Image (cartoon, rainbow, N blue to C red):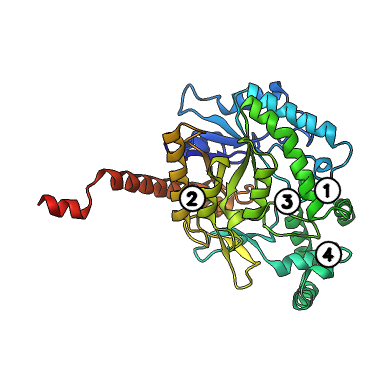
Amino acid sequence: MGMLQTMRWFGPNDPVSLMDIRQAGCSGVVTALHQIPVGAVWSVEEIEKRKQLVEADNDRYAPLHWAVVESLPVHEAIKKGEPERAGYIENYKQSIRNLAACGIQTVCYNFMPVLDWSRTNLSYEMPDGSRALRFVWEDFAVFDLYILKRPGAEADYEPEIIESAREKFAQMTPERVLELSAIVLLGLPGSEESFTMDTFQGLLNEYARIGDAELREHLYYFIQEVAPVAQEVGVNLCIHPDDPPRPLLGLPRVVSTEADLAQLMAACDVTANGITFCTGSLGVRPDNDLPGMIRRFGERIHFIHLRTTKREKDSRNFHEADHLAGDVDMYAVVKALVLEQQRRERLGVGEPSIPMRPDHGHQMLDDLHKKTYPGYSAIGRLRGLAELRGLELGITRALEEAVILPSAGELIARS
């Protein structure tokens, strides 16, 4: 069985329709109830409404089903370890139970403080004229040092970065300042609201006493509370790695490396405590051995994001490359995933068809003239999915033929 092919769908207002996803060849939909406030219970009624929306045309066309929740967000009170986290954790448990009652068994979440993800350019022009997402450390320093003016930020940057950021900021127009600020704040949950720099700084201040050790402690407490419930009702939780995988804005990030994932898996040793294996996020770091991580964490991988990034001259800078290009050895990654699925099928354990979505995609062709969610235009993801689908098929067939076909030595002996 191959990977379950899916695409992310942001709901009825997404410019990419369910029919678009169906015509891309997907049978699974990755979505969430974005309209429900973070920390509130997802009721069976609301879950069923979204499920029915996804399945509405299944009697006429190739069927779709809600395969993965991305994301069931974790309230900031849980991340900060505040007293009221107990109530939010109980709500989270109930949402898991309700999702299980509706037949949804895979739930992606993340534990990044304040910002879910960070980029500094949403329309970086590629050599072929398509547009990609990009992160530039110097530009992020401009925002941090000279727009936000975070107290103590200078300690996080080298003197040459501070100076080059100062020079760049001095040349920026007011329009560019607003643009960069809007891009950074796009990774802020609820960023459709109007956040001021003071408001944003206030959110950062709430983490003043929370360092690496404290955030890990809060994550492990959370997973020890919710994973047993998920295990009991047959739901797999899968944490998304930090994006990018390094501390930003003075905030700790604790899901960036293989060691981070190993500690989290050991903190609650049940299968339901699992991983969203995002090759884009993990692949930004050259010290992450992605195929090796798949072999070592295989049974805990419940969801896959396949994309690749290209590190630039300053390795902290990167842009999102074509799905089969960049710094991720996608052949080795997909081969390791195929072998993991075959292992599951052979042993009769776990789900042999792991949900996978082509993560992000370049804005290209007709989508260059449309407004879409950054990274989630239809055509770029369709291109990525087509390439990944072909790669998986080729690897699967090659492995099958390696078992079935006689070796060259056997052919010679027979002749």
Are dots 2 and 1 in contact, CB under 8 Å?
no
Q: Which residue is mark 1?
A: 194
Q: CA distance from mark 3 to mark 4?
A: 17 Å
Distance of mark 2 from mark 1, alpha carbons?
34 Å
| N-term-proximal mark, 2 vs 4 | 4
Label drawn at residue 187: 3
Q: Amino acid type of disc 2?
A: Gly
Question: Which of the labelled discs sits on residue 3, or is there none?
Answer: none
Closer to the N terminus: mark 2 or mark 3? 3
Report the front residue among 237 and 62: 237
Residue 374 is at least partly visible in this image: yes
Look at 65% across and 46% down and name the residue there.
240
Label 2: how many Cα within 10 Å (few below 14, some 14–19, many 20+): many
Q: Residue at x 50, y 54 (%)?
A: 291
Q: Earlier in the sequence, mark 2 or mark 1?
A: 1
Q: Residue at x 49, y 46 (%)?
A: 382
Label 4 sits on residue: 147
Give the residue type at disc 3.
Gly
